[in-house]
Image (cartoon, grey):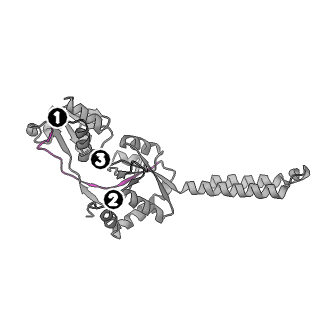
């Protein structure tokens, strides 16, 4: 999703798809730009109705009704270390003797999220995590959204990083999360059906194609 | 939605009930009723339109 700094309006396939599905059942969508942590809190409270790209976890099912998936994507979890220290993490077990930087409220993968033996150092966001890594506050940082952290590192002029040999390979569903406390939760079945209809009809591919972006896999 | 319907039904009922009082005071009752009815209809339309808006968030992708 891209935000036009002049108009303040966002655009992108996820925006267009939700608007199209909502339109089919007589609804409109009002968008707001917000950091994920804020969206995540408001999903729990019901003060936002829908948040795109919410990873499905058992814990989140308590307050999120998942719309989709509109496809799947390879979303491997990487670990960033200092250059020359790629061999620091060769297996998952190596993590237990390291300080690992993590981003608050982010779902990485089940084993890691529930692992209390790992020394996890919480960061507020990518910018905060990049600064902490540069300041040697932890040995490695776990990465879900690679472009976001690369940008944050570039912004602070830090380039002494590399990817560890170990990575967690995973395929995740691409869902929109709808708050179970939303006052519109009653339309969930119809909205979900409208969204899945876009997948079945090939409209998802068309929309992604319009933006020159590879669509998520449907398999 | 039921709550809103009840509210508007009650409002219309009250409007009807008060007609003799307003008339006895010399108010142009028909005009007042027409204006109030239009306002109620306008408000109801706005409320219903608001009801069909989903609030959604997005996160900007880094360029």
According to the picture, the residue beneath numbered tag 2 turns out to be A69
Relative to B52, say whether A143 is above or below: above
State which quadrant residue B30 falls in: bottom right
| Label 1 environment density (alpha carbons within 10 Å; few <14, some 14–19, many ≥20) | some
Range covered by the magenta-colored residues: A160-180
Q: Which disc, if any, is residue A195?
A: none
**Spatial distance from mark 1 to mark 2, Cα to Cα?**
33 Å
Q: Judge if badges 1 and 2 mark residues of a common chain.
A: yes
Percent coordinates x, y for residue A40 in the rendering: 39, 43
**Chain letter of disc 1?**
A
Percent coordinates x, y for residue A191 in the rendering: 44, 61
Residue found at x 39% / y 56%: A15
Instruction: Say what secondary structure mark 3 lies in.
Output: loop
**Spatial distance from mark 1 to mark 3, Cα to Cα?**
31 Å
Residue found at x 37% / y 40%: A37
Relative to B55, say whether A134 is above or below: above
According to the picture, the residue beneath numbered tag 3 turns out to be B62
Please identify, in this view, whether the residue under mark 1 or under mark 2 is nearer the observer.
2
Left or right, A122 with respect to A95, comes to: right
**Chain letter of disc 2?**
A
């Amino acid at each position: 999703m891209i935000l036009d700094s002049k108009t303040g309006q966002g655009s992108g396939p996820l925006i267009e798809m939700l608007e199209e599905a909502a339109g089919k059942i007589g609804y409109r969508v009002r968008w707001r730009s917000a950091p994920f942590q804020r969206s995540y809190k408001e999903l729990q409270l019901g003060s936002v109705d829908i948040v795109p790209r919410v990873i499905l976890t058992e814990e989140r099912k308590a307050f999120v009704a998942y719309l989709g998936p509109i496809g799947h994507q390879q979303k491997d979890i990487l670990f960033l270390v200092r250059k020359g220290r790629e061999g620091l993490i060769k297996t998952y077990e190596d993590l237990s003797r390291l300080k690992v930087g993590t981003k608050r409220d982010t779902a990485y993968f089940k084993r890691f999220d529930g692992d209390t033996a790992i020394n996890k150092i919480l960061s507020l966001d990518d910018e905060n995590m990049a600064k902490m890594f540069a300041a040697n506050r932890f040995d490695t940082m776990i990465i879900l959204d690679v472009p976001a952290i690369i940008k944050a590192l570039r912004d602070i002029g830090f380039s002494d990083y590399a990817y560890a040999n170990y990575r967690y390979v995973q395929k995740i569903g691409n869902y929109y999360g709808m708050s179970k406390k939303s006052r519109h939760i009653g339309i969930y079945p119809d909205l979900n059906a409208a969204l899945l209809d876009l997948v079945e009809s090939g409209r998802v591919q068309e929309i992604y194609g319009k933006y020159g972006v590879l669509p998520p896999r449907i398999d | 939605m039921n709550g809103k319907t009840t509210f508007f039904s009650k409002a219309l009922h009250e409007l009807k009930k008060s007609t003799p009082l307003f008339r006895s005071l010399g108010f142009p009752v028909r005009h007042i009723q027409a204006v109030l009815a239009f306002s109620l209809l306008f408000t109801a339309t706005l409320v219903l339109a608001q009801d069909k808006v989903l609030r959604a968030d997005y996160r900007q992708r880094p360029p």
